[in-house]
Amino acid sequence: MPSITDLHSHSTASDGTLSPEALITHAAAQGLQRFALTDHDTTAGLAAAGQRAQELGIELVPGVELSVSWEGKVLHVVGLYIDVTHPPLQAGMAILREKRDTRAREIGQRLAEHGIDDAYAAAQAFAAGEMITRAHYARALVADGHAKSPQDAFRRLLGRGCPGYVAGPGAGLGEAIGWIRGAGGVAVLAHPLAYGLTRLWLPLTLEAFRDAEGRAIEVVYGNNTPAQNRKSAQLAREYGLLASLGTDYHGPKQGGVRLGELPALPADLEPVWQHLESK
Ligand code: MN
Ligand code: MN
Ligand code: MN
């Protein structure tokens, strides 16, 4: 039986391709009953998502995925069960979004120097008035024939070491977790095995996250192999962390697993929602 819970997804408020309403409609149709919208550095989609979820009788967990810079690495920290009105969280995200815009312009300049003109405007059109991310650049580069697929765009043009690469903005680790906790939420380290951390850095990262009052990690993740799910479960046990799970859905044809097809968490781990509901 697949899990009826999915706590990691994106809408057009950041780099997903479905509107918040369409995303919730799809999630409900796929049998999900507890669903988090976790857009990058914004909660702009949550009101519309919440209204649709209420109409359809599913639980929307208010969430966000914050970009963090730590020890020269980029980490993603998901905040779940957040009060979106919390001023420090909103102020922090506003700064991150401003830096994302500066970065988006710099990517456009680098690509122009590489002979690809007008990529910023093209990416802006794909972002449709919301923040411009590298995913929008990837789609624009595919549409204009500069790349065969979004993956190809990342591999040759947008990824680390490529001509259009510009490092992304990030909050401090303690800072991001502080905003989430201040907003009454719980901080989850997203996809711990997706950062390319070495055997030295993976434990250091988990320790730092736990020391900064991070409470959970994503154990079952849409882009994990079954072996990676097992390894993540082992990490949750080893570090005494709660377990979360999520597809990281960005829309149809954006890679990863489909909604409603995630396996359930291992029975011995405490799910993050159960912990909160028991309080
Ligand atoms: Mn994304
Ligand atoms: Mn992420
Ligand atoms: Mn994500």
Image (cartoon, grey):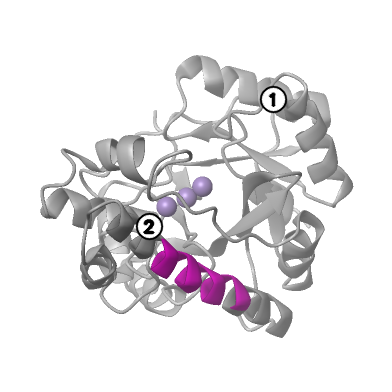
**Disc 1 residue type (three-letter):** Asp
Residue 96 in picture, x, y percent from top left = 59, 70
Q: Of discs 1 and 2, which sits in the foreground?
A: 2
| Sequence order check, earlier mark of 1 and 2 | 2
Q: Is residue 98 magenta?
A: yes
List the residue tagged with mark 2. Answer: 110
Q: Is residue 113 above or below residue 221?
A: below
Residue 133 in picture, x, y percent from top left = 39, 61
Magenta segment, prevailing SS (helix, strand or loop)? helix
Mark 2 lies on a secondary structure that is helix
* The quarter of the displayed image where residue 199 is located: top right
Mark 1 lies on a secondary structure that is loop
Q: Residue at x 80, y 24 (%)?
A: 238
List the residue tagged with mark 1. Answer: 268
Q: Which quadrant: the N terminus? A: top left
Q: Is residue 217 above or below residue 44?
A: above
Apparent side of residue 106 relative to residue 179 in the rendered image (left or right): left
Q: Residue at x 40, y 61 (%)?
A: 58
Q: Is residue 181 magenta?
A: no
* Front in this rendered view, residue 98 or 205: 98
Magenta residue span: 95-106
10 Å neighbourhood of mark 2: few (<14), some, or many (≥20)?
many
Residue farthest along the top direction in this orientation: 227
Q: Residue at x 54, y 53 (%)?
A: 167
Residue 196 in picture, x, y percent from top left = 58, 28
Whether the residue under disc 1 has CB within 8 Å of ligand 2: no
Q: Is residue 139 above or below residue 20?
A: above
